[in-house]
């Protein structure tokens, strides 16, 4: 800032060089911070999707206990109907990233209880079949199941364990989340 002292001090403002130097420093800081922001955003999406799936599984188990009827969690398409094992959804994704829904069985028919929208930035691999929780205690039909949640990113740095979450479901129907990969191909 230039100040002139002639009788009374007056300040005119910043010079063009000072303004350009500040703008250049701000631009440099933004460029350096961008990869960190992208990694934070990807990790945040993975955490959010893992918590959404975990809460859906807990909800399905609690509905079995409350209703006393079988409850199914399955991958769904845009029309909210269950997809067959390995069948891709509209955008070609064949994992749980398409979204999922919770259905209760009533008189041989399935009624929708809750649905989760798709999120293209996150991949959820693991069980390709429906998950059925049965009364009276909400057990899961089948054996232990697991899901691996990771960013759907071409970056090899984001494919390592810090960006992955694992959800394991015991035969009793209780689900747990942990950091890192879990080999969810079961």
Image (cartoon, rainbow, N blue to C red):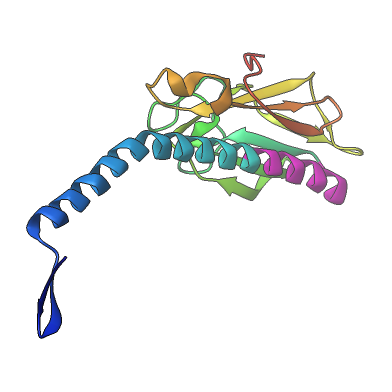
On the question of residue 124 being in view, the answer is: no
Q: Quadrant of the C terminus?
A: top right
Residue 103, horizontal then vertical, whole percent: 67, 43
Q: Residue at x 73, y 22 (%)?
A: 145
Q: Nearer the viewer, residue 166 or 30?
A: 30
- Is residue 139 at all visible to an observer of this figure? yes
In which quadrant of the rendered image does the N terminus lie? bottom left
Check residue 96 for magenta coloring: no
Question: Is residue 65 in the magenta section?
Answer: yes
| Magenta span main SS | helix
Q: Residue at x 64, y 17 (%)?
A: 184
User: Residue 137: image x %, image y %?
Assistant: 91, 38
- Which residue is at a point 80% across and 41% down the rendered structure image? 61
Q: Position of residue 59 (x, y in %)?
A: 74, 46
The magenta-colored residue range is 53-69
Residue occupying the point 53% across, 27% down? 150
Q: Is residue 143 above or below residue 91?
A: above
Judge left or right: residue 174 versus residue 158.
Answer: right
């Amino acid at each position: 800032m230039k100040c002139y002292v002639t009788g009374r001090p007056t300040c005119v403002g910043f010079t063009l060089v000072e303004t350009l130097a500040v703008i250049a420093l701000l631009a440099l800081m933004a460029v350096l911070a961008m990869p960190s922001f992208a990694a934070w955003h990807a990790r945040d999406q993975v955490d959010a999707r893992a918590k959404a799936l975990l809460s859906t599984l807990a909800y399905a188990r609690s509905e079995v206990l409350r209703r006393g009827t079988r409850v199914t969690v399955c991958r769904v398409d845009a029309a909210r109907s269950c997809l067959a094992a390995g069948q891709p959804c509209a955008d070609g994704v064949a994992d749980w990233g398409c979204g999922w829904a919770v259905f209760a069985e009533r008189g041989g028919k399935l009624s929708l209880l809750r649905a989760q929208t798709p999120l293209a930035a996150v991949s959820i691999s693991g069980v390709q079949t429906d998950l059925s929780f049965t009364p009276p205690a909400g057990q899961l039909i089948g054996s232990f199941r697991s899901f691996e949640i990771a960013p759907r990113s071409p970056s090899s740095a984001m494919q390592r364990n810090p960006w992955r979450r694992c959800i394991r479901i015991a035969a009793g129907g209780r689900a747990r989340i942990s950091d890192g990969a879990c080999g969810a191909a079961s």
